[in-house]
Amino acid sequence: MASIGRFALAAASATQETTLALASLKFNFSLVKIEPPVAYSRFGSALSTKRKREAENGSTHVTARKLGALFADDVPQIPNLSHAYGLRVSEIAENPKFNPRGSVSNGPLADHIGADGTSIWAAATSGRGAMAVHLLACLLARVWTAAEAISIWSEVVAARKAVLQSRLQEDNFHIGLVTASQIEVNRDQLLEWDASARAWLRTADSAMRT
C-alpha cells in the first residue's frame, strides 16, 4: 500500500510539472493574432499603419492578451454589446473629422495623426475576454485619474491572480488556468493600456458633441 501511495504522489507531481511546463510554453504564443469580429473590420482599416501594427504585434497587444486571459473564465459574455460597440467605433473611426489621416506633408508625424484606437483593435484581435477588459479600461478612465486607475488595475490584477491560484488547489483545473495564474502585467503596460483608452474616450466625446 505504501508503494502505491508513493507512486500516486510521484504521478501527481509529474502531472503538475508537465502542466506547468506546458503553461510556460503557451506564454510563447502571446502574440498570436485572433481574427477580429466582423463588426470591427472597418475599424481596423481606419487605423493608421503604426497604430494597427502596435495593436496586432506590439506591447498593447500583449497586454490585451494577458488581461483577456486573466479574466476570460469569469468575465460576462457581451456579444450584443461588443457588436454594437464595434459598429459605433467603426463609424467614428471612418469619419475624417474625428480620425484625420496623416499625409506626406506631416512628415514623420503622419502615423501619429488621428484617433488612437490601439487598445480597441488590440482587444478585437486578442480573443475571449479582451474586449470586456477594454471596456473596463474605458470605465475606469472615465471615473478616475490615470494614477488612480492604474493603482486600481494593479489591485484588480493581483486579486484576480490570487483567485486563480486558489483554484489550482482544487482537484480539477484546465491548463489555461495554470497559464493565467502566472501572468504578470506591470505598471508600464497598465499605463499604456489606460492611456490608449483615455485617448479613445476623447475622440468618442468629440463625436458625441456633434
Image (cartoon, grey):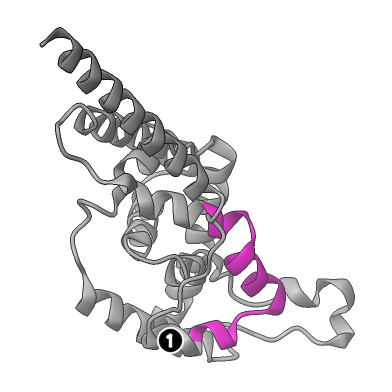
Segment tinted magenta in the rendering: 43-62
**Residue located at (62% from left, 74% from top):** 52
Residue drawn at point x = 37 percent, y = 38 percent: 19
Classify the position of the C terminus by image quarter: bottom left
Write the residue at 33% across / 78% down.
85
Residue 46: % across, % down: 58, 86
Q: Nearer the viewer, residue 161 or 113?
A: 161
Residue 144 showing in the rendered view:
yes
Q: Is residue 43 left or right of residue 109?
A: left
Residue 85 vertical placement versus 210 (above, below): above
Total count of labels: 1
Question: Residue 7 in the image: x percent, y percent?
Answer: 24, 19
Task: Name the chief secondary structure element in magenta.
Answer: helix
Report whether 106 appears left or right of 182.
right
In terms of depth relative to the viewer, which is nearer, 35 or 24?
A: 24
- Under mark 1, the amino acid is Thr
| Residue beneath the point at 58% across and 67% down | 55
Question: Residue 43: x and y, percent?
Answer: 50, 84
